[in-house]
Image (tube, helix red, strand yellow):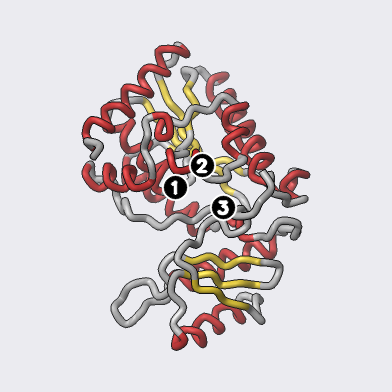
Amino acid sequence: MVDGAAQLESLIATVRRRLRECGRDAVAVAYSGGVDSRFLCHALLRAGLDVLALHARGPHVPEAESRLARRRAEEAGLPLEETEFQPLEIPGVRENGPRRCYFCKAALMRRLRETLARREAGGEAPRLLCDGSNADDLKAYRPGLQALREAGVFSPLAVAGFDKKAVRAAGAATGLVDPLQAARPCLLTRFAYGTTPDASLLRRLAGAEEALAGLKGPDGRPLLGDFRVRLTPAPLVQAQRLPETALPRIDAVMTRCGLAPWEYREEAVISGLYDRNAER
């Protein structure tokens, strides 16, 4: 069993070593507001490092998630800069093939580098750009990882061997708020490859997922567990739990959001639906 304190020390040493190698004293983190990027910022702040979070708003990120990312940064005393990002303007994203995430991530990293260059032009010291990819991401189909490598972005969690379980455990042990936060990937992942995403559909998906996340079971727990609303291209509710008694409540949400008629699928594993058979 890996010692959590030793692994955390390794993470900080990894970042300090990279800072020395590139002659920098400060860090910028691509900050979605998910548990991985929040934990990375949290760990670096605890170590006394100069950290700036960079959050990209856009139609692919529900506004509720951007608000939560902003609030979590404020609670943590984490400096945050937000920037607008429009992935639907990128041809490789509009075409929505299996390498969509590569094109999106490459453009996003260019945008974040532009943000850092503007700050440097204003007199701020150069920063090492990092992201929250973890060791589990290295084992899955993640075409965006290539874009990160090409852009020279450093992934400390992956380098230090932190998988999602370790991130959650270390976060809980060091006071990170909500270390069990559910993963909510970019909304573009809800579209089957070959279907065309647009801003209106993204808003409707975001609204449906926000409403479904608010449904509670008799025990007060989230009714569906982990779930996604996808377009396959037919609307699909994919969830860990789909009790028959909940279907009318789900239907009311899907109808209100303009996503009816819809299908449903109960599955233990929710993530990566379209990538399970994606051509590498």
Q: Which residue is mark 1?
A: 33
Tell me: 228 left or right of 74: right
Question: Judging from the image, what secondary structure is the residue with disc 2 in?
Answer: strand
Q: Residue at x 62, y 26 (%)?
A: 150
Q: Residues at badges 1 and 2 in contact (C-beta under 8 Å)?
A: yes
Tell me: 217 left or right of 90: left
Q: Residues within 10 Å of mark 2 (few under 14, many from 20)?
A: many
Q: Which residue is mark 2?
A: 55
Kind of residue indicated by mark 1? Gly
Question: Judging from the image, what secondary structure is the residue with disc 1 in?
Answer: loop
Q: Position of residue 11 (x, y in %)?
A: 33, 29
Q: Considering only order in the chain, which callout, 2 or 3, is on the residue closer to the N terminus?
A: 2
Q: Which residue is mark 3?
A: 186
**Alpha-carbon span between mark 3 and mark 2:** 13 Å
Quarter of the image for residue 232 reads: bottom right
Q: Position of residue 74 (x, y in %)?
A: 36, 45
Q: Residues within 10 Å of mark 1 (few under 14, many from 20)?
A: many
Q: Position of residue 199 (x, y in %)?
A: 69, 59
Quarter of the image for residue 157 reads: top left
**Alpha-carbon span between mark 3 and mark 1:** 11 Å
Q: Nearer the viewer, residue 57 or 230?
A: 230
Kind of residue indicated by mark 2? His
Q: Residue at x 58, y 59 (%)?
A: 273
Asked if residue 271 is positioned above or below residue 21 in the image, the reply reads below
